[in-house]
Image (cartoon, grey):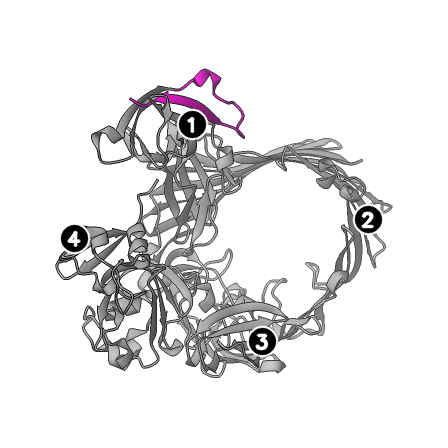
Amino acid sequence: MKNKQKLNVVDNNCIHSLSLLTLAVLFSLYSTKTFAAEYFDPAFISGNEDSQLDLSFYSKDGDISPGDYLVSVSVNEKVMPEKMVKFALNKEYKLVPVFTPNQLKALGVDVENVPALKNLPKEAPIENIIALIPDYRATFITSDLKLKLSFPQLIMKNKSEREVDPTLWDEGIPALLFNYSLMGTSSHTSGANMKNVLAQVFGGMNLQAWRFRFNYFGNYNKYDGHGNSNTGTNNNFNNVRLYRDIKSLKSTLQLGEIMPVLSIFESFPFKGISLSSNEEMIPQSQRGFAPVITGYANSNALVLVKQNGNTVYQTYVSPGPFKIDDLRQTQLSGELEVFIQEADGSIRKQMIASSSLPIMEREGAFKYEVSAGQYNASGSEKSKFALGTFSYGLHNNITLYGGAMGGNTYMSSVVGIGTSLGTLGAISFDATTSRAKLNGMDDWKNGQSYRVRYAKNMLSTGTTFDLAAYRYSTKDYYSFNDANLIDENGLLSWGRAKRKNNFQVSISQQLGRYGSLILSGNREDYWNSHEVNKRVSLSYNATLKGVSYFVTYNIEKRKDEYNNWPEDRRLSIGMQVPFSIFNPSTLAEKSSLSYAINTGNHGNTTQNIGLRTSLLEDRLGISVDQDYSKDKNTNNNSNLNINYVGEVSNSALGYSYSNDYNTLSGSLNGGIIAHPYGVTLARYVGASPLALVEAEQAAGTKVNSGIGTINNKGFALVPIGNAYNKNPVSLDIYSLPNNVEVDNSIHQLYPTKDAVVYTKFNTKVGYQVIMTLMRQHKPLPFGALVSVVGDETNTSVVGDNGEAYLAGLASQGQLTVRWGNDAQQTCQVNYTLPIESAPQDKNTPVIEYTADCQ
């Protein structure tokens, strides 16, 4: 138990420690003498009317002495952590809070942009704040020790509630980590046997802020049949890279095999070095594009921003003009309703239309990338280059972006602009020039490419134009990829024909409880060819009374490896029926039956029926399915797959059979990490931050709702997905062993990208006990303080009938009980718990025990 909170009152050179109980007496009791005003007689405390203790500040209801107080603080109606605040008398003899410029900055005031504050010494106390900030207000509720502060919203830094102080970012502990995947197949066909083994490793090392990563791929295959026998192996390392954060720039430095981060130029692989903005280091409320909302409040007002009837943002503002520039991008699409609710209950409303494109940035936001290296793709030229790109959010919802790159055989530049048109949507336009010296050619090719993109959401009808884009390229325009992949004859591979026009569109329509409809398409034509590559997809998805349906129709015309342009049309219809609609049992809820039919314009129709279920709390998954087709060239496959999710690995076993062949397959994947505390296994240690959790003597305890489990060595490894943000890691107290307690079951972690963050839960190995404490055959007095000898932080308070609850007790030990300052008001307990009769049921693990206090 914590000691009773105390209020420290500083009065001249005398520091009085007054408990909250004493203050209550001070504020509620009055002298029996007669006075014209409310008066408190100091004799109630000192027993002497001539006491030198000056309590005149308590003579009026609500008044207290100047000094330092630990108070609850709220700023513009937002609650902040408790702070020690100094209070002093101003010229009107009113008690006011005193702050320094640094303290005002900690409260969220943008001190550097307030002329009256920015030149003051950072630690200079300011008593008359209202003279420097005219709209400032302070209200101190003495009875609750609450200080309410109100500042003009325009001088406040907009700090999102989810924004994390960068000083909390944790680079993690040194670690070697590997994620492995092993898969093997054994196939038998008429007269032949084939075996194949695949191994993949994603690995690396963490050391302070540095991260090293690589991918490994290994393959072994053996063929034996028809008089031939051969084996083959292949080993390959790729994506070998070294990277780290540059916190001061909110950027990431990368070296090795990487790709450009910003999408201003067409993405390409290269070996080299790159420094680029890291959007993950920016609060979510400052990422991407969002409009700036301005307005005026006549009083302390609540501002609500709603979209389609749902509140997406709310804040309190003080009287005067305000500006909201921290709306989340994910919340925005279509029209926004802004409600200003004044203190008197009156409400004003304004409408703001907003649309955006991925390239757009909010006002004042800046992203950049600078890179240098050489092109890195199999069978390509290795052109060297350097590039720089940027995007910047201007006023009036406009974004400017561009970049330039140059090298020994290639140069290019791009400039573009994007803007929100309000109710009309969002549009961007960019132009790119290229100058390329191609493989085996002496002259330079000069070309241009132009692109227009458009997006719009109509929430009232549920229609979304996710992205419509058109690009036109001149005959001699080459992207950096094209320039490096072209052969000595000036020709691209069959999969990369020379594009002329490209058009893409994606439209979705929400139909409420009747599902959704999605239409997407792509049309592309080429220089020196009359053929057109096109793809159109129309899909419908719905769920009715638990049954899921889908219908998909695809049309595709694409150049094949034989230089032909066949057109494929395919219709797919399917459904999935959960057994729970027939039977509400647990097994039925985990089981379903599926059916799908697929037919095309070339006459081949296939059908599939499948059964799926999961057991052992979803750890074991079993599926069986059967294909059927009348086409003689299509195999009718029968498949059985079993998957198991283990504590430190995932495994799968599969068998497939048809008239022509049968295949047995198996896989195993998991992770392993070596760290300063040992070696820990886990199901996955991939590309995300990890928490290494230690909880001694807590084997079997679930972490983060069962994502991980404490092993026999007291460790668990669990992924935590949000780098640079607050991530709760919790122990399931209901799965703790009977004799284990934890002081705090939730820890907050703030990992950087791909960090391994260590956290230790302080567990107490012992028993939960309700102990009835007796002395001379009578219960100890109510409120007596009980402490464990040798562990004085483990305390309790005696309740009714002498009962005290204690956790984490050893099987035997000593207690000290105190209920006053006299020697006669304390006693000792020597106890030995009846372990043999301790409850074994986790739901009732408390031991009841009676002890004499001597």
Of the 4 image quadrants, the one containing the C terminus is top left
Q: Mark 4 to mark 2: distance in Å?
A: 101 Å
Within 10 Å of disc 1 (Cα), the crowding (few <14, some 14-19, many 20+) is many
Q: Please say if 846 is above or below 381.
A: above
Q: CA distance from mark 1 to mark 3?
A: 57 Å
Callout 4–callout 1 Cβ contact below 8 Å: no
Foreground mark, 3 or 4?
Answer: 4
Disc on res. 336: 3
Between marks 2 and 1, how big is the CA–CA gap?
66 Å
Looking at the image, tell me whether mark 4 or mark 1 is earlier in sequence order: 4
Residue under label 2, please give it: 606
Counting residues from the start of the chain, the first of labels 2 and 3 encountered is 3
Numbered mark located on residue 769 in the image: 1
**Label 4 residue SS:** loop
Identify the magenta region.
833-854
- Image position, residue 87 (x, y; %): 24, 66
Query: Depth-wise, is mark 2 or mark 1 nearer the camera?
Result: 1
Tell me the crowding category of disc 4: few under 14, some 14 to 19, or many 20 or more residues within 10 angstroms, Cα based: few
Please state if 40 lies on the left or on the right of 518 as rendered. left
Decide: marks 2, 1 in contact (CB < 8 A)? no
Question: Which of the image's four quarters has the N terminus?
Answer: top left
Q: Position of residue 643 (x, y in %)?
A: 64, 36
- Name the residue at 23% across, 63% down: 65
Residue holding disc 4: 48
Q: Earlier in the sequence, mark 3 or mark 4?
A: 4
Can the viewer see residue 473 in this picture?
no
Question: At label 1, which amino acid type do we have?
Answer: Val
